[in-house]
Amino acid sequence: MTVTPVHKLIGARIEELNIAHDTDSDVVSQLWSLIRRYDLLIIPNQRLTDEQQIEFSEQLGPLETTKPGSTGAGTKLVTLSNLDTDGYPVEPSHRQNLIRRANQLWHADSSFKPIPAKLSILSARQIPDHGGETQFVNMRSVYTALPKHEQEKCDGYIAIHDFAHSRKTVDPNLMTDEERAAVPPVRQPLTIDHDEHRGRSLYIGSHVSHIEGLSKNCSQQLINRLITFSTQDKFIYSHHWKVHDLLIWNNLTVIHRGTPLPDPLMPRVLVRTTIAGDKPLIAC
């Protein structure tokens, strides 16, 4: 395989690899090393079935089961699509498009779970000719760029991650009572200590409702300030999708967001598998 960085702070393009056929244990080990180094991998020309994506993903670790309310609930896949079951684009007010709007907020997948996800693996099945980029930020680089006093302050804080909080910014009725009950708010550290070689990362995004120990006003000011700092242009890599692109990223070091399509009726289908975490970020 060949490896080419795509941004000075995040991401590498991996070529000369066919993951449907070439992923023995040595290749999987190499991919993990590249994930630890680059945080985001872009692997083009991966024409995958759902079964092949699951089989490949499970070589990287156990998969999460899709939560209620998502397309694919109860399975190992999440389908991110603006098409109905007959393959026609849904109306802009349709629930699927409201969910897509919520995904345009900066976030880390599954940060609202007691044990957050390690990796997301996203396969482009149907892509419009232009628009709908996905943007990524390496939160290790963000943490390093924070002033020292801000780092020390953030290291001591606990953030509350609440999936319903981010969804209600788009539509207060986007989640049912059953869906809210399935993902109650959880406590997560505001920064994550990885190891002596990889440092710390800021762990924040749209799922954060507030910071423990701060007033509502001070909490919101800090959240807004950190997200604004994190999403400066210099930190952002924008991925322009091509059909059969496969992206893998580390959810503990990366936040991402979708961007709007020029026309919400342009067909777009992506399929995600999610590598489950193995322990809480806060010791019980």
Image (cartoon, grey):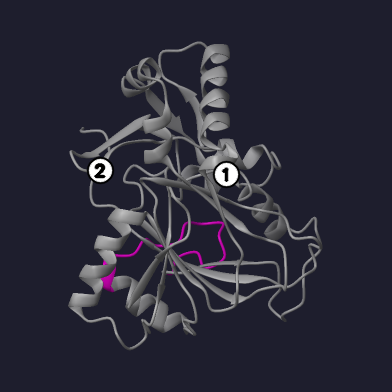
Q: Which residue is mark 2?
A: 198
- What residue span does the magenta drawing correspond to? 59-75
Q: Is 66 colored magenta in this rendering?
A: yes
Image: 183 above or below 121: above
Position of residue 176 in the picture relative to residue 73 (left or right): right
Position of residue 56 in the picture relative to residue 28 (left or right): right
Position of residue 167 in the picture relative to residue 128 (left or right): left
Please name the residue shown 49% across and 85% down the image.
Answer: 47
Three-letter code for the amino acid on which mark 1 is drawn:
Asp
Neighbourhood count class around disc 2 (C-alpha, 10 Å): few under 14, some 14–19, many 20 upward: few
Distance between mark 1 and mark 2 Cα atoms: 40 Å
Q: Which residue is mark 1?
A: 177
- Disc marking residue 224: none
Image: 134 above or below 231: below
Three-letter code for the amino acid on which mark 2 is drawn:
Arg
Q: Could you tell me what secondary structure mostly forms the magenta stretch?
A: loop
Image quadrant holding the N terminus, namely: bottom left
**Disc 1 or 2, which lies upstream in sequence?**
1
